[in-house]
Amino acid sequence: MFYLWLYPLHTEISFFNVFRYLSFRIIYAAVTAFVIAFLLAPPMIKKLQELKLGQRVREEGPSRHLAKTGTPTMGGILIIFAVLLSTLLWADITNLYVWLVMLSIVGFGLVGFVDDYVKILKGRPKGLTAFQKLTAQTGIALGIGLFFYSSTGYSTELSVPFFKTFTPDLGPLYIPFAVLVIVGCSNAVNLTDGLDGLAIGPVMIASVAYTIVAYAAGNRVVSDYLLIPYIEGAGELSILTAAIFGSSLGFLWFNTYPASVFMGDVGSLPLGAALGTVAVVSKHELLLLLVGGVFVMEAVSVIFQVLSFKSRGKRIFLMAPLHHHFELKGWEEPKVVVRLWIVAIILSLLSLSTLKLR
């Protein structure tokens, strides 16, 4: 809104010309989201405690986690609020892509909210059934995929990391592919959210990476130079991803070990969906496998564990997701978290290098 309200005044007051620049708005979107999350977290944590919205810890997990029982959860509501408000303030709200990603956030946020509600207030530890959750997620992602496919001029070709001219065209198959990217990323972040600060760290790192990707994809000069697809209007999504970084940073202050609040599914599901949707808009869907490598490893560890146990009756890992495997091997929780953050940083740097190495 600031862009629409203040930039037109630059003809009379030259200072307002700064609102024209994405770089300026990216920085202040992140700062605004951080301030909102940081200032509102304490009263929200207090309110969650009053409402007795505490985390239920599964007994089959590492025994040390039982001490976390009752820690306020559903803090993801604050993250989403900070992201949406900061985006509305600093982005060009006439941009359709911005609204599409915000719709994805709200839709998956509602699924996560219902899941958390069922877990905590209805006393069902597993929340919604897998079928219920996946059906709702797929429905939202399908709507997004159909929008892209029906949009005039939107390409169904894939941009493959490290390749300049290899751009396979999926045609109608792009719709289920987009659904897979969005739903897969959403659930992968959700699976990673099992230790204090573990999921929010890689989310921050991935959001910075996609801030750069979205900015490059939305800039004709930069995209031509890097030989990546130019997506008109995609640059505004860098405002939203910057807001994700800022709000996540503010939340991390209270989510770091030992956590005062957990984000819950109402936070992890929409954050993953937002990253997946931005990846689809910016035409860097496959890059998400590298940018979100930690999420991929966590999700794959669960898949392999289940397949191995059902087919052979044996487990590959001591426990899945992967972070619990390291815990049971004797790593302290902060060590697991920080080391996986380091992996996330390295993978994001490698992913950004692919913009040039083609």
Image: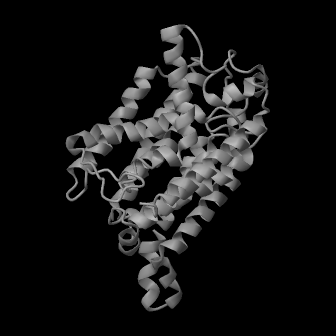
| Residue 219: % across, % down | 39, 71
Residue at the far top in the pictured view = 313
Image quadrant in which the C terminus is located: bottom left
| Residue 103: % across, % down | 40, 48
Q: Is residue 83 above or below residue 112?
A: below
Relative placement, left or right, of 130 versus 51 is left
Q: Is residue 166 above or below residue 19?
A: above
Q: Nearer the viewer, residue 323 or 122?
A: 323
| Residue 309: % across, % down | 54, 12
Image quadrant in which the N terminus is located: bottom left
- Colour scheme shown: one colour
Whether residue 191 is visible here, answered yes or no, is yes
Relative placement, left or right, of 292 versus 34 is left
Q: Nearer the viewer, residue 351 or 292?
A: 351
Q: Nearer the viewer, residue 215 or 40?
A: 215
Q: Residue at x 30, y 44 (%)?
A: 145
| Residue 248: % across, % down | 62, 51
Q: Residue at x 38, y 30 (%)?
A: 136
Q: Dividing the picture into quarters, in which one does residue 326 lie?
A: top right
Q: Nearer the viewer, residue 343 or 38?
A: 343
Q: Residue at x 39, y 72 (%)?
A: 225
Whether residue 241 is visible here, answered yes or no, is no
Q: Dividing the picture into quarters, in which one does residue 163 lie?
A: bottom left
In this rendering, the count of numbered labels is: 0
Q: Is residue 135 above or below residue 160?
A: above
